Image (cartoon, rainbow, N blue to C red):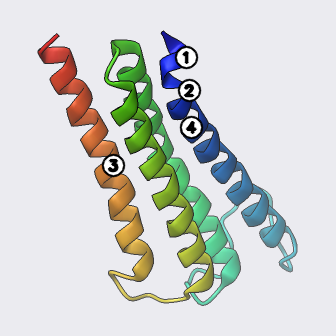
């Protein structure tokens, strides 16, 4: 059964690798700051600081990760269509990577910013997968 979800598992691995990379970048960058204290948010609390943006990117991914993991596991364990599960999980992974890149390179307080669109695309992929899975469960 789980072989059918290989694409989903690859997408999950990409999502987890992305969060680990963000963690490395955010921690490494913050550690280089004068007066950095482990476990404390960066002192520069604004988008003009790459350290702040790297930290927020990682925090934002963590905030999104638990819901997406729950949705993916519900889809897989319920036997939802493997193609759509993989497609929507992969779409989420790509949206989160693009969100990360844009957050790293664009220092803006504008809302919505270009990164906001990719945040929303990832969020929509999560919602679509959850709805798809719920429909699958109800019509089973």
Task: Give the image quarter of residue 106.
Answer: bottom right
- Number of other residues with Cα within 10 Å of mark 1, as a class: few under 14, some 14 to 19, many 20 or more: few
Q: Earlier in the sequence, mark 4 or mark 3?
A: 4
Q: Earlier in the sequence, mark 3 or mark 1?
A: 1
Asked if residue 60 shows in the view, the reply is no
Reading the image, the residue beneath label 2 is 6
Query: As displayed, is residue 66 above or below residue 105?
Result: above
Residue under the point 61% across and 84% down = 105
Mark 3 and mark 2 residues within 8 Å of each other at the beta carbon:
no
Q: Earlier in the sequence, mark 4 or mark 1?
A: 1
Query: As displayed, is residue 111 above or below residue 139?
Result: below
Element under disc 2: helix
Q: Earlier in the sequence, mark 3 or mark 2?
A: 2
Reading the image, the residue beneath label 3 is 125
Reading the image, the residue beneath label 1 is 3
Mark 4 and mark 2 residues within 8 Å of each other at the beta carbon:
no
Residue under the point 38% across and 88% down = 110
In the displayed structure, does residue 60 sit left or right of residue 122? right
State the separation of the CA atoms marked 3 and 2: 18 Å
Across and down, in percent, residue 94 comes to 51, 57
Q: Earlier in the sequence, mark 4 or mark 2?
A: 2
Residue under the point 43% across and 51% down = 91
Reading the image, the residue beneath label 4 is 12
Across and down, in percent, residue 51 comes to 70, 76
């Amino acid at each position: 059964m789980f072989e059918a979800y290989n694409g989903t598992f690859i997408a999950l691995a990409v999502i987890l690798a992305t969060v680990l990379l963000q963690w490395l970048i955010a921690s490494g960058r913050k550690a280089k700051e004068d007066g950095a204290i482990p476990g404390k948010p960066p002192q520069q609390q604004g988008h003009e600081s790459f350290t702040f943006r790297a930290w927020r990117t990682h925090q934002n991914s963590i905030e999104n990760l638990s819901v997406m993991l729950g949705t993916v596991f519900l889809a897989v364990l319920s036997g939802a269509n493997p193609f759509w599960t993989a497609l929507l999980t992969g779409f989420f992974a790509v949206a989160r990577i693009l969100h990360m890149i844009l957050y790293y390179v664009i220092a803006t307080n504008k809302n919505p910013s270009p990164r906001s669109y990719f945040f929303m695309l990832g969020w929509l992929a999560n919602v679509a997968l959850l709805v798809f899975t719920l429909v699958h469960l109800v019509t089973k």
